[in-house]
Amino acid sequence: MSFQFEVLKRDATSGARLGRLATPHGAIETPAFMPVGTAATVKGITQDELEKLHVGLLLANTYHLYLRPGHELIARMGGLHQFMAWRGGILTDSGGYQVFSLAKLRKVTDEGVRFRSHLDGSEHLLTPEKAVEIQRALGSDIAMVLDECIEYPATAERARAAVERTTAWARRSREAIAASDGGGTNPGQVFFAIVQGSTYEDLRRESAEQLVALDFPGYAIGGLAVGEPHELTCEVSARAAALLPAERPRYLMGVGRPEQLADYVRGGVDMMDCVMPTRNARNGCLFTRNGPMNIANAQYADDPRPVEEGCECPTCRRYSRAYLRHLYQANEILAAILNSTHNLYFYLGIMRTIRARLREGKTIEGVATPD
């Protein structure tokens, strides 16, 4: 199966759209939420369980896999799908955000990003060409070109420089992609470009126009969810999405909380990812229709009920709050597994509800929990 994207239905009152995204490793319905599997694993969840949760597309990270175990090793193993025994689709981030987060360990120039590994202090240079090389070896279905992600707030001058560099790097990436066409471990792999511009409308427009002119198969909206208010994230992402080709998929990177997902969809976003479901689960935070639950609270010590009455996830069908609290208090590995299963089921359920409502022509405004 080759890469294809089709918009099946548009919401009459917002920018929301229902779609179908086909990848070499299967098709998914959009809008879709992607669980984060940074180091070729969604923490606390086996691939079998991800399949049972109907995950069709997950995210892995170029920066982390480059440093450990190394893209050459993964290529020798047949690519990332083979290495991690995953049958579904994979999207890889270029590593730009991870390098951005290493403020004290990196230096950004027009050539690329020179950084020191957070693992052993070794020095590396990540260029647009290197990001393409690594992701060709990984063989993800959707790969990202290298961009410059900047902090919030940022001055207009700082944001403009990042836009110019991101566009220049996208041009170099385009050349590297063409030169390596047919190589790597996944001949059907495609690359998305990433729109930058901080919260400046004119710079977002310039970035989008420049990248659209380079004709990528899809586009991401980056540089958001880095500290700005949710309302501003929605405003900026919706305006950026409206500047992108209607027939191409739009990916908003690194969002969001359960009650925020429908807002991004209404802004015209087709794909999202966030570490929150699994990270919060490992810290004892479980998402429910009545709001977040801190399973460590003493009130759950002898509570025989499931996390959520009526929830059909494997955790709620079998285990009590009392048992989950015991596991968490005892620092048992099973706590992270069961909590993560519930939280992912909750997030994926919200997206199923959103898609169902779009299919039926109903509003998605205010959707914050699964139906």
Image (cartoon, grey):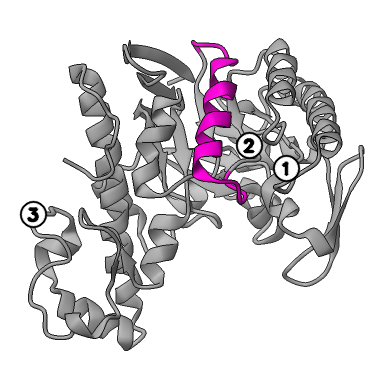
Q: Mark 1: which amino acid? A: Cys
Of labels 2 and 1, earlier in sequence is: 1
Q: Which residue is mark 1?
A: 149
How many neighbours does mark 2 have within 10 angstroms: few (below 14), some (14-19), or many (20 or more)?
A: many
How many neighbours does mark 1 have within 10 angstroms: few (below 14), some (14-19), or many (20 or more)?
A: many
Please say if 350 is above or below 84: above
Q: Which residue is mark 2?
A: 222
Q: Position of residue 76 (x, y in %)?
A: 63, 48
Which sits in the foreground, 232 or 150? 232
Measure how far apart labels 2 and 3 are at the Cα level. 37 Å
Q: Which residue is mark 3?
A: 310
Q: Position of residue 37 (x, y in %)?
A: 49, 53
Q: Residue at x 27, y 31 (%)?
A: 354
- Looking at the rendered structure, the secondary structure element under dot 3 is loop
Which sits in the foreground, 278 or 121? 278
State the extent of the magenta-drawn residues as a range: 225-247
Which sits in the foreground, 273 or 296? 296
Q: Mark 3: which amino acid? A: Gly
Q: Residue at x 19, y 64 (%)?
A: 315
Evaluate if marks 3 and 1 touch, with contact meaning CB atoms under 8 Å apart: no
